Image (spheres, rainbow, N blue to C red):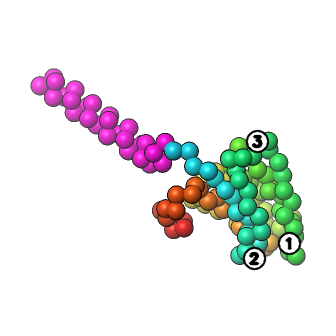
């Protein structure tokens, strides 16, 4: 009886470890790219895995400006002259689940992962 309980506990622990590995991407380190879009068109593409030092970009549009901060595989908007500053309050993003959007400036920043060609379950891209 004691052996059956240990086997069941071991099997459950093994299944849990396998599920965590699968959900985290199988342990593969994919390249991340951030796309900065103005008015629905890609304005700039940033390779986040190649950013050794943190830096800022000032993105100007006819509606105003945003300062985009790139650091450690993440991207954020640190400054904007829009009235609500929702893009600044959103903070940094590291994955493709939620893009940064500044509606007054028609700015969108999204992270695109890897070169696998697979469809992302969250974004559908």
Relative horizontal placement of residue 95, taking residue 9 as reference (left or right)? right
- Gap between marks 2 and 3 measured at Cα: 29 Å
Q: Residue at x 79, y 42 (%)?
A: 53
Image position, residue 2 (x, y; %): 16, 23
Q: Is residue 59 left or right of residue 33?
A: right
Q: Seen in the image, is 11 located left or right of residue 110?
A: left
- Mark 1 or mark 3: whose residue is earlier in sequence: 3
Q: How far apart are the alpha carbons under marks 1 and 3?
A: 27 Å
Viewer-side residue, 27 vs 56: 27
- Check the image and report above or below for 4 versus 24: above
User: Residue tagged by mark 1?
Assistant: 61
Spatial CA distance of label 2 from label 1 is: 9 Å
Q: Secondary structure at mark 3?
A: loop
The percent coordinates of residue 76 (x first, y second) are 74, 54
Q: Which residue is the extreme one toward the left?
A: 1
Q: Which residue is mark 3?
A: 52
Depth check: give the residue in front, 74 or 26.
Answer: 26
Q: Magenta span covers which residues? A: 1-27
């Amino acid at each position: 009886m004691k052996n059956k309980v240990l086997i069941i506990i071991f099997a459950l622990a093994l299944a849990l470890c396998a599920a965590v590995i699968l959900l985290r991407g199988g342990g593969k380190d994919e390249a991340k790219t951030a796309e900065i879009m103005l008015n629905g068109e890609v304005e700039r593409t940033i390779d986040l895995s190649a950013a050794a030092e943190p830096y800022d970009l000032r993105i100007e549009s006819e509606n105003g400006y945003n300062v985009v901060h790139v650091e450690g595989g993440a991207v954020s908007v640190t400054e904007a002259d829009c009235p609500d500053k929702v893009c600044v309050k959103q903070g940094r993003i590291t994955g493709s689940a939620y893009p940064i959007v500044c509606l007054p400036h028609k700015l969108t920043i999204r992270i695109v992962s890897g070169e696998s060609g697979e469809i992302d379950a969250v974004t559908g891209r």
